[in-house]
Amino acid sequence: MSLYEMFTSKGPSGFGYGATAEQVTQGLKLDGKTILVTGCNSGLGLETLRVLALRGARVVALARTLEKATAACAQAGSGPGKAVPLACELSDPQSVRACVAEVKRLGLKLDAIICNAGIMALPKLTKSHGYELQFFTNHIGHFLLVTGLLAQLTEDGRVVVLSSDAHTRAPRGGIEFDNLSGDKGYGAWRQYGQAKFANLLFAKELARRFEGTRKTANAVHPGVINTNLARNLNPMVGFILASVGPLALKTVAQGAATQVWAAVSPGAAGLSGQYLSHSNVAKPRADANDPALAKRLWEESEKIVAGLGS
């Protein structure tokens, strides 16, 4: 496929690789909708915040600190009433629980939760609460946040979990349940792949638990984008990304499209338990469709969360 065909081709949704978040929401009026977005202060999260606010939604904008969340809302043009900035450090369970409590205290009912935040390819093993940091931040942090807010979802609320095609880099079996600390072996991309695999399984199991309701859960591959997520990469890799970006990488506007489409588009309303890419249904690695594996991860995640205390 030529670059021209890649950027212009469209899938069943009517959108494709080159679609932007503004394009997939063109004509939508989101007034009265409240959508929570993690990692709102840069990259895909900031663009998601901007476009959702542009279409009229009130955005519950989460960043590691209240100052970063507030600054993001101002940068995105989201004034009072259109955004609710909150602190949520996903690697800190106390911060996540405080965020959940504040959402509940404010009485916010959520039409969608977009789990956008994440860290990628840490060069050396780093831990939080005894667990490898990418798994703990990208998966456990979001697991704690979303499960804490399930009662706040509206009857047709949607949960969108940012995964990645990097889930294919996960180790054999998908999740190393005997090595969640990383002590038995660590690889920057292997553990990142495992975290993204966990994100995918979480969406799958959540969708199963939503069966019989109008609520949905899906996982998303945004595409390859040169954002702050790549800050830990080898400098040479960063140079290559910057060099080939205009030809091979999505822009931030394009990268945010699929998660925004999944969260608000009428075309995504009937989808649940899917892996989405370029605003269309895609195929993940085969074992990502294993319901027993997804259930086991959920149960293991519950044990981890219970062990963190209150």
Image (cartoon, helix red, strand yellow):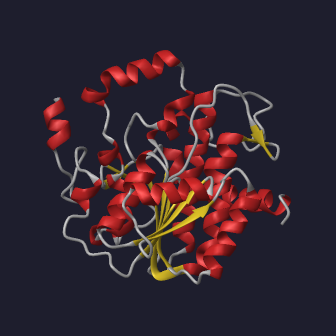
What residue lies at 33% left-to-right and 79% top-to-bottom?
31
What residue lies at 41% left-to-right and 54% top-to-bottom?
75
Q: Which of 86 and 309 is in front in this view?
A: 86
* Count of marks, rendered view: 0
Above or below, 116 against 237 in this view is below
What residue lies at 68% left-to-right and 54% top-to-bottom?
140
In this picture, residue 188 sits left or right of residue 212: right
Above or below, 241 against 39 in this view is above
Snapshot quadrant of residue 127: top right
Snapshot quadrant of residue 180: top right
In this picture, residue 146 sits left or right of residue 132: left
On the question of residue 202 being in view, the answer is yes
On the question of residue 292 being in view, the answer is no
Above or below, 268 against 110 in this view is above
What residue lies at 28% left-to-right and 72% top-to-bottom?
266
Snapshot quadrant of residue 196: top right
Question: How far across and how far down the image is residue 129, in percent?
Answer: 81, 47
Question: How far across and how far down the image is residue 19, in percent?
Answer: 23, 50
In this picture, residue 162 sits left or right of residue 3: right
Question: How far across and how far down the image is residue 303, in percent?
Answer: 79, 60
Which residue lies most toward the top here?
236
Q: Which of 158 and 282 is in front in this view?
A: 158
Question: How far across and how far down the image is residue 131, in percent?
Answer: 77, 43
- Where is the N terminus found, in terms of image quarters? top left
